[in-house]
Structure formats: C-alpha cells, structure tokens
Amino acid sequence: MKNKGGIRNNKGAAKVLLFTAELAAGFVFSGTHMSGASAFADISIAGAAGLAGSAAVLLGSLLYSFISGSVGRNIVKLAAMVLILIAKLLMDNKRDPRSNGIFTAICVLLAGTAVSAVIGELFYKLIFYIFYSSLAGFTAYSLSRIAEDVKKGRSADLTAGSGCFYAVVFTIYEASLCSVDMPLLNIGIITGAAVTVTAAHFYGYIGGVICGSLTVCASFLASAETGMTVVLLPAVGLFTGYLPRRRASVSAGIFCAAGFMLMVLTGMTENGIDIMLNYILGAGIFLAVSPYFSDKRIRTQAQYIAEMPMILEKRSSFMSDSIGSIRRETAQLAAVLAKQKKAEIQTVNELVKVCDKCYRRHLCRRQGSTSQKGLERLNVMMEISQENFPQELDTCIRRNELIRARNKMIHSDTLAKLMEMRTADCRGLLGEQMRMTEDIIRTMGSVPKLRRSEPISRRMREKLEKFGFVPSYVTAYYNNSGRLLAEMYFSAENAPNSVTRICDLISDELRTAFSISEPVNSGKEVRLRLFEKPAYSLEVCTASRRAEGSEESGDTFTVFSDGTGTGYVLLSDGMGSGRDAAFESGLTAELFKRLTTCGADCMTAVKMINSIMLTKSTEENFATLDVLRIDLDTCGLTVIKSGAAPTVIRHGREVTKVSARTFPVGMYERSEAYVTDCEFSEGDIAIMFSDGVSENEYLFIKELLLRSDDLKNIVDEICSKAPKFSHSDRTDDVTVIGVRVVSA
C-alpha cells in the first residue's frame, strides 16, 4: 500500500508540474507576436492540451493581459481560448489530434469573425482570420501529434511527413520566443543556436543546415530586423557539422568561432556583441545537455540509410564465411562416416578379353557367324548360368570364364545405373541448394528496419580500443521497440578471451545494463552481440525419459537467443533411439542454432540442414525438427515443424493444437517445413513433445493446461503418463518441453 501511495503522489506531482508549465506558457506566449500580428502559440497549446491544460493556458494569458493592460489587444485570442475550453467540455475532453486541430481552427475563426463584426471591420479582416485560424489549427494538430507520441513513448520521427509536424511547431514557437523583448538577449536566438549546434554535432552538416534554416525562418517571422541578425546561422551549422566527429566542447568552440568569423567577414558588426552573446549562451546550453542527449528518441532518414550498406556488406560476408565453414566441416564428417570403397565401373568388354586369351580363337573366327552370334547373345543376357548358356558356344573350352566375365559385366552395368541415379539425385539436390542461395541473397539484401546510432557506435569503439580490444567493425542501433543493440566483429586472431569483460566495459560506458549473446565464429571473424533486456523472457521447463533398454535418449532440445531479442526453443527427435539417434538429433539442433545465430532465416536454415543430412553419408538417417521462435519484444510466436509431433498452445483460456504433415529433415531432397504464426501473450503456455507422446494423451494435456498454471508440474505429468496412453508394445524416448512468456 505504501508503494501505491508513492505512485499516486508521483502522478499528482507530475500533474501539478504540467499544469504550472502550461500556465507559464500561457503567460509567456500571450504577449508574443509574429509577422506584425499576435502569435497564436498560446492558442495552439490550449487547443492541443487537455481540459485542465486549456484552462491553465487561458488563466496564464488572462494574467498577462491584466498585468500588461493588453486585454483589448488580446481579445480575439482570449475569446478563442474560451471557445476552445467550451468545445473541450462538449467533446468530453477528447485528445484526438485531428479533432483538436479542427476545433482550434473553428474557435479562432469564430472569435475573429465576431470581434471584427463588432468593430465593423469584418470585410477587411475575414480573409486574414481564415488564414490565421488555419495556421493555428494546423499548429495545434501538429502539437497534438507530438504530445501523443511522447505520451505513448514513441520516438520523434523526423522522416517524411512526420518531420513536418516537428518543423512547424519548432518554427512557430521559435518565432514567438524571438519576439520576447529582453535587453541584449533574445530567447529565440539562444534556443535556435543551441538546437543548431546540437544537430550539427550529432547529425552532421545536414542537421546543422536544417535547424539553422528553420531558426532563420522563425526569426524573420518575428521581425526582419531579428532575422537579419541570424541570417548566417545555417552557414555556421554547415561548417560545424562538416568537421569530423569530435568532443562536445570542440564543437561548441568551432560553432562560436565560425559565427564570429562569418559575422566579421560579412561586415555584420553593428549588433555583434548581442549576436555573439546569444551564440555563446546557445553553445553553453548545448554543452550542458549534450552528456544527456540520446538519439534513442529521435529518428532521422540519415540513420536508416547512412550505414546500412556497410552493415549489409559485413553481414553478408560473415554469413558467407559461416556457410563455407559448415560446408568444410560437413565434408570432413562425410569422410569419417564413409566406409565403402569406390566401386570400379568396367568399361571394357570382358568377353572379348577372355576370347583373346584362348589358343582356339583362330578356329572360332574361321567358324564365323556361329561363334559371333553366340557371343552377341551372351553379351545381352542379364541372367546367365550353365543351363541357359548359348548353344552356339557349346564347344567353347572357356565356358566358365565367359560366364564369370558376363556376370562381372552385369554387375558393372548395374553399378553404373546406380551411379547414374545418384547423379540425378545430386542434380536435384543442387537445384535445391540454388534455391537456398536465392533465399539467402534475398534475405541479406533486404534493408532491416533499424536506426543506427553513430555517436554510440563511436563511443563503443573508443572504449574498447582504450582497453586494448581491437574490433574490425562496431555498430550500435535501435530496433522497432526502441531497444539498443550492438554488433562487434573481431578477427579470429584478435578475438577477446572474455565476453563478460566486453559487456561490462560497454555497460559502464553507456550506463546501461547490457546482456551479451554467445560468440559466433565464422572461421575468419568472431561476432559478439550486446542488447538491452527485452520486455519479456522465457520460462522453460523440461521432462524426459529414455526408451526401455536404451542407454542414451535420441531426443535433443536446446534453448538459445540470436542476440536480437528473439528466443528459440528447439526439439529434435532422431530416428529410433540410442546413440545413433542422439547423434542425428544433436547434429540437426546444432546446425539450426549455428545457422540462425549467423543470420539465416528459419526456412533457409531448414533447407540447408536437409541438404547436409542427405549428403553427409550413404546411410539413411533423419531427424525431426520442432522450433518455437518467440519475439521477446512483442510476444510474437512462430512455429516451425519438419516431421515433428504437434504443439499444444494455451492462449488465454483457449487450447489449440498446431500440427503439420511434413517429413523429417534428411529424408527427401526437398524439405517441406511448416511455418505458421500463432497468437501468444504474456502468461500463455506452449507444450512441445517428441514422438514418444501418443495422440491419445492430447485430451489429458488439454485438461491439464486448463486447470493448472504450474509449468513444471504440467510437463512432469505429461511425461510420466506417456507410457499409459501408448498402445504400442515398443517404448520410445519421451521429451516434454513447457514454454511460458513472462515479463522481464
């Protein structure tokens, strides 16, 4: 109860603070102007805020108007805010951005029309108020969109149309601040200078030019005189952003120096002291906030495209090396498993060789067609013995040698046909491998929806190099959920001995708790992945029993993560039971884990495993593959099956069975994996099991899931009851895995 009271107190304090800020905004912006008319910044805040916020802005504006004696000048604004407050009461305090924008525009137009009609200037000012109300409504709409993003924890999207909302709000409120009268100082110019140097430092010359240009535009909207004092700000942002990445203090110094030099070179020294004072104060604000700046909440187009080609190139080469390493290891495995010698295919007619050694060959040749006809008949016979030996060769003294020679030829022909069939199988396998290659290229060529963070990437590299680690490539990026991830590549000879040390160094540098995935070795490079903890984690419980008379279970299961916030639970059942089955299932599980952690998608991994299992030896061995792929940011569940038993899923209070008629990997040339997405949420349970669990047990499993939440007890019960539900005399290995998503 004490904690709940503290939370309520925090929420109450936040509401009081927000109300005070809105009250102050109404007071400050009420006296501002833009392009010779009263600025509508306070009206837009009232339109975008909630009911309490609109009242706070109106109260602040009234206070300023009474103190400054400008009630008459601000009558239109005050009337508009009163109408907005009434509209929000009628709208039941809805916060829809579109409604806020429309009602703000209508209220401003009604207030302006009414006041103009009273003073008899309706005809002259109607067009002005139509334009004025449209701008005020669009600004309120833009501010509502921004407030909605902040409330929902979204990143500020400065790309495409979303960036327009931020540009409009920045320009309007910057113009209003520029019109605030203060001796020597100009709040708008100081704010614009701080934003410009911040953008130039973190986003390069593009950020400096854009923010500088918006500041100049806002200054000219305030007044031409103010605009002329900062007309060179985009050029200052350009020079500051063009220079290589540096410390914040250096960027601030370059910004002030560039501003001073451009001012002197252009002869704009009349208000030089005022201008430089504003620039220096803006640079000071930048120095104060730069240590706390994070691009986690800001998205720009440059982040998506600047480093993506390099990332894709690095991932592609890493994947290629990994596949080559697996291929070489598979070839070595095939050499160890191969026990049969290569059969020699006879290409010479053995019958002729027997006749050439006979001393009676000249007599047979004088007989002519009779002996030749007998040899031709013998040459096409597929089964030969003493009984069906050709009559034309009854007088042949080398009858037994001819029979042995013909049988040898028959064996060679049969072997040649088998080799031809094998070649045809290899052609089919080659076609499947080409399809796999196409899938890999397509997967690696697609640009991921990631936002790269250049400042954090640079800090990571510098931190590692400072402590003696030499990565070949470092990149940090945010995924769609706003989680920070990082990839570091080291050459094989420079690979770190302790991944925990790497994780601790980066966590200490960024003051963020990171986890690190297992190192992945491509043969030439080693990759490490660091990641912030996702929203969910996996709770996994298992139970298993061996078949009677078997010393080792033929089932293999593993739980792993690819380092991007995706968890995998895998179960493979080898053919039969015992050591050979365990070898097949273990190989299948290890290959799938290695391929997916290297970057292959699940379907490509299954196809490649199928190809390896087919060609690794002449023996017929295969294994099932059952995989749950879970996105730990969103709870998204994907089920992949290749010859595996069904999976039972409890979603809410509903229990469903996911099954597919597919073949195990290694049985046919073309893999037929089944992939489906399932609804899954926090607290839901998925049960996987091997073929040792009979379908007769499914009703019992369903009842067990509906009446119990004890995951360990569920898998133990299923495993212990498996022999009772089986009608077969032969027992099989049993493995049961229970998976539940829990909050992290």
Image (cartoon, rainbow, N blue to C red):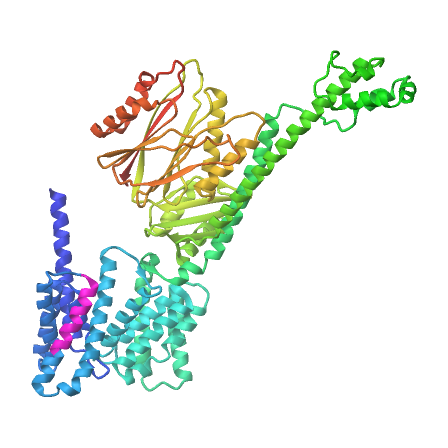
Camera-side residue of 316 and 576: 576
Q: Per the image, is 332 magenta? A: no
Q: Horizontal and vertical percent for residue 695?
A: 33, 24
Image-quadrant location for residue 650: top left
Quadrant where the image shows the C terminus: top left
- Left or right, 182 with respect to 318, comes to left
| Main SS category, magenta section | helix
Q: Horizontal and vertical percent for residue 549?
A: 43, 13
Quadrant where the image shows the N terminus: top left
> Is the residue 546 above or below the residue 542 in the image?
above
Q: Which residues are magenta?
A: 96-111
Q: Is any part of residue 486 visible from this angle?
A: yes
Image-quadrant location for residue 130: bottom left
- Left or right, 561 with respect to 352, comes to left
- Left or right, 450 with respect to 366, comes to left
Q: Per the image, is 103 magenta? A: yes
- Left or right, 422 with respect to 151, comes to right
For the point 27% across and 40% down, the residue is 681
Q: Is any part of residue 492 visible from this angle?
A: no
Camera-side residue of 470 and 161: 161
> Is the residue 231 above or below the residue 629 in the image?
below
For the point 22% across and 28% down, the residue is 708
Image-quadrant location for residue 149: bottom left
> Is the residue 406 above or below the residue 666 in the image?
above
Camera-side residue of 10 and 71: 71
